Amino acid sequence: MLQIGVIGAGVNGIASAIKILEHFKNVLKTPVQVTVLSEEFTPNTTGDGSAGLWGPYLLGGTPQSKVHQWSKGMHCFLQEIWLSEDAGEAGVCLLPCVRLTTATNTHVEDFWRDIVYGAVDLTPDQLAVYNKERTVKYTSGLSFITYTSEPRKLLPYLMKRFAREGGRVERRKVTDLEAFVRSSTFDVIVNCTGLGSEELLGDGQMYAVRGQVTRVKANWLYQAVLDESDVGNYIIPNTDTVVLGGTHQERDYNTQVCPQDKQFIINGCRQLVPGLANAQHLFDWVGLRPGRRQLRLEAERRGNKLLIHNYGHGGSGVTLAWGCADDVLQLLLSNLELKSKL
Ligand SMILES: Cc1cc2nc3c(=O)[nH]c(=O)nc-3n(C[C@H](O)[C@H](O)[C@H](O)COP(=O)(O)OP(=O)(O)OC[C@H]3O[C@@H](n4cnc5c(N)ncnc54)[C@H](O)[C@@H]3O)c2cc1C
């Protein structure tokens, strides 16, 4: 039986593990054992603090065509869940969104506008509403509808789905990848360690992109507002709470809550939606996004083993997870030697 080990239980590790397991079991009808090995599981992965809004963000120089393909894969997956009986459990919601920019020479970056629903540019009158109290004016905006899949719900749902199909989990930190590949019984190893790859592989292209957010109670809010400028804020409702953001500090590894960042977040978000002044503060959170010059999704041979890398998803790990998992599966299937083993 083919033995596959996935290192990392973040959204990309779990998505890759499920994708492989379900394909082998339900499409190829071939026995396979998939094991997820990870130092941390939900609720302690990077995605757990995020709002899980669909939207490509902070992806370095990753080619746009790949980002489009991967993010479309996730959008289709979210649509499937949304239309299924699992939507509530998986925390998948449809949400109206407004993205605003202050850039003078460009519109809101929207190479993905064909993926989301009902994308239209804001009219000057609509833009004026957001510009009322501002000195630096927004120059354009895009209104559309997309999904949130808050990882605090999505990850437990995916873990359950993985276990139901016979997937195994093991809490373990891999400290020496070469020794692990050589000595383990896995035929294929999928590396989804996110920022952990910086240490595990000595990958000098990796860097943390620190993100601090505040969660508040504001159950009357049903719209995401995102300021795309470098010093912009964002507001993203989840099912029970609303995420106010946020920072994106490159090469900052500080996981402590910073009071100045908190003030920036609260003041900026109140300017966008004044009603937040009366929202109940719940907690603050800091996470380190797995930044990389380019997302790494490729396979390499190590002896008679296949090692597939899937890490460096920056600020879009949730947005890309299912699409990237698709490519992980294709890399696995296209390996001729493995094909003959099926
Ligand atoms: C504030 C903030 C807001 C965000 N908002 C969004 C959003 O709205 N939408 C969106 O798409 N993305 C968002 N992101 C980005 C998203 O959270 C990340 O891109 C995503 O979580 C990365 O997932 P991952 O599975 O690749 O890595 P991780 O979630 O970091 O998982 C890595 C896993 O590998 C394990 N691991 C690491 N090293 C080892 C090792 N040596 N041995 C064993 N296990 C190991 C870890 O324990 C963990 O389980 C946000 C991030 C932040 C910080």
Image (cartoon, rainbow, N blue to C red):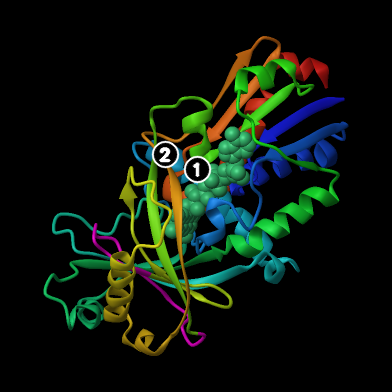
Q: x, y (%) of residue 296?
A: 48, 31
The numbered mark at residue 69 is 1
Q: Is residue 90 left or right of residue 111?
A: right
Q: Magenta stretch?
A: 219-234
Q: x, y (%) of residue 56?
A: 42, 51
Q: Answer above or below: position of 34 versus 260.
A: above
Q: Is residue 281 left or right of residue 258?
A: right
Query: Is 220 inside the magenta-drawn segment?
Result: yes
Disc 2 C-beta below 8 A from ligand 1? no
Q: Amino acid at mark 1?
A: Gln
Q: x, y (%) of residue 197?
A: 51, 32
Q: Is residue 316 left or right of residue 4?
A: left
Query: Is 9 inside the magenta-drawn segment?
Result: no
| Residue furthest to the left | 135
Q: Answer above or below: position of 31 versus 219.
A: above
Q: Quadrant of residue 154?
A: bottom right
